[in-house]
Image (spheres, coloured by chain):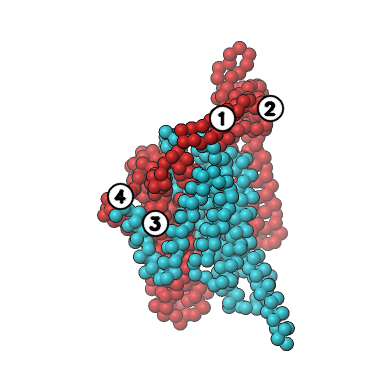
Chain colours: A red, B cyan
Amino acid sequence: MQFFKTKKGRLWTWLLVLLIGGVLVWGTHHDAAIYHDPIMQVTSVRTGATTKETDDFHNVDAQTKQTLQGKILNGTYKGQRLTVTNTYSKSGAMDQRYRIGSQLFVVVHERSGDTLTATAKDMKRDTPLVFMIWLVVGLLLLIMQFSGFMAFLSVAANGVLFLMAILLNGSTQGAQVLWIFGSLAVVFAALTLWLVLGANRQMLITLATTLGGTAFAIVTALLVFHFTHEKGMYYESMQYVTQLPRPLFLAETLLGSLGAVMDESTDIISSLFALKRERPELSANQVFKSGRQIGSTIMGPLINVLFFIFVADTFPMAMLYLKNGNSWGYTFSMNMSMGVIQSLISGIGIVLAVPLASFLASRFMEKKVRA
Amino acid sequence: MSTISALGLILLILMILVGGKAGAQSFLALILNFGLLYLAIVLVAFQFSPLIVTLVVGMLVLALTIFMSSGDDLSSTVAFIASAAVLVVLVILIVPVEHWAMVQGFGPEDSEDLEGLSVLVGVNFVQVTTATAILSTLGAIAEAAMAISAGLSEILEQHPQVTLKALLGDGIAVGKQIIGTTFNTLFFGFFGGFLALFIWFTGVHYSVGEILNDKIFVSEILMILFAMVSVILTVPITTWVMTRAVAGQRKRAVKGQEKQE
């Protein structure tokens, strides 16, 4: 750690990360050997005929056949050459256009005579994934140095916890999803705040605000669901649902709003602690007032952050609905309404956290904040 | 009353109670942002180029979010210029990576939702997915740029004579404070949204290799990573724009004094 704080130490660490990352990115391009499924590298492409397609809604598209030649990189068929045909469309929503050098997973069928026959399954994508992770870590260390490392560590720790919770949820067949992710939220918040603030009174106040704000939002949502009889909520429009949708939806909303409420309460409470440090003569009421003022300037942009995360994701599907002749209203209901409801519930949590943070900070802050 | 309008009404009332006029304004900005997002989808469905639509709508969203929330002129202007610059840099990064990873459109996991829909609609889905990734980070860019420029303008208020070099260091220091918590907002926001997908992966027993190369998984993780890159880049870019703005102001002030003399 001490080494990391010197200029030379930082430079070396950064170069090391750069190098290791480069090796990893290069490695994923040549890691076919560790995959079980056969991977083919394309060496030549012959483009066939293009046919024009028009669907019932007068959308015009073009489909092209291509013949790919390449060799298998791994497994029992390693080194063998084979030919695969593939069809891609101009829009490419469900298909891929492969180029020379592309690596793709193939399904090899039993050999008939001397030649192998196979069908293309999907593109190999781990290299761009690792490249982007490398870019994020490199930039974090370059610009944020040690705190960048801590930020990354807290995201990584939360990622591991998240994975464990999902496995736990799987082993209970999803019956306890809300309880699992509800208690996970408490652990998430405590761990993250401990990493960011350390174990002290400020952290405890922030934790209480975070949990309180999120809990208020969920309770409000449940009350509203009860009184409106969930009118206009289309659980069937949720994607990838494999278990009871309602608790899953609540768990998603709970997790989604947790981060933003935590972000906000950290900001408000640390500003209030700093304020009290500079001007210890401020009364609890004055502290409460400034907390409300700080909070009301940051709540809007924060709700926006979550809104774009929840709703922008539905862009491709919503566009497809419109292209398939659905009305604007139906497209909204079937794609965006659940995301909007999630943003609204999170928004309620974010707004409620403002008075809560200001109140808790103003009452439970030490009389004299240590510098 | 439908659930959406009831929740919306409660949010509006709470925002006014807590933030007064600023709260009402933020709520209005939220509604306008929704309108812009929907407009973008409709325009793309009418065969406008997804990338150009996203750039124009993106600039409008940034302007709306930044100028409609309370803040002094200097910090709002700086935040807008900086976030617009980040948006452009982000487009330059996202376009080649999306072409490389080929995560456009839908995956096999979507087939149930796609039943009865024609997917050959003649819109370039690489561009649509790029547009989705850009749009989903807009809120984060605006928030980070505003937080940093507001922090810096407060420092300028307290120490009006601070040197430009010290201001540059201050910007990074403010950035360090916000980056940790902003990452958490992004992490939980995105993972909350993808919870169902991840449960699907473990339920259907995908192998690690299958998950790491899955179209939908890679596309979602790339979205988080793009958002993180944009937030990291916002720190130095906003700080730099702020020092340029302050340098310009000081030059003008000196010139003004010379004229008076």
Same chain, marks 1 and 2? yes
Q: CA distance from mark 1 to mark 2?
A: 25 Å
Residue at the location (61% across, 57% down)? B86
Q: Nearer the viewer, mark 4 or mark 3?
A: 4
Q: Which mark is residue A344?
A: 3
Tell me which label, 2 or 4, sits earlier in the chain. Answer: 2
Tell me which label, 2 or 3, sits earlier in the chain. Answer: 2
Q: Nearer the viewer, mark 1 or mark 4?
A: 1
Q: Secondary structure at mark 3?
A: helix
Q: Does residue A198 appear left or right of residue A64 in this picture?
A: left
Q: Pointers 1 and 4 in contact (CB under 8 A)?
A: no
Which quarter shows the N terminus of chain A? bottom right
Q: Pointers 2 and 4 in contact (CB under 8 A)?
A: no
Residue B217 pos. (x, y %): 51, 41
Q: Within the image, what quadrant is residue A10 found in?
A: bottom right
Q: Which residue type carries mark 2?
A: Ser
Residue at the location (61% across, 41% down)? B99
Q: Does residue A160 appear left or right of residue B81 in this picture?
A: left
Q: Taking A230 as reference, is B251 above or below it?
A: below
Q: Secondary structure at mark 1?
A: strand
Q: Residues within 10 Å of mark 4 (few under 14, many from 20)?
A: some
Q: Nearer the viewer, residue A245 or B25?
A: B25
Q: Which residue type carries mark 4?
A: Lys
Tell me which label, 1 or 3, sits earlier in the chain. Answer: 1
Q: Disc 4 designates what residue?
A: A231
| Farthest-out residue, front | A58
Q: Disc 1 designates what residue?
A: A52
Tell me which label, 4 or 3, sits earlier in the chain. Answer: 4
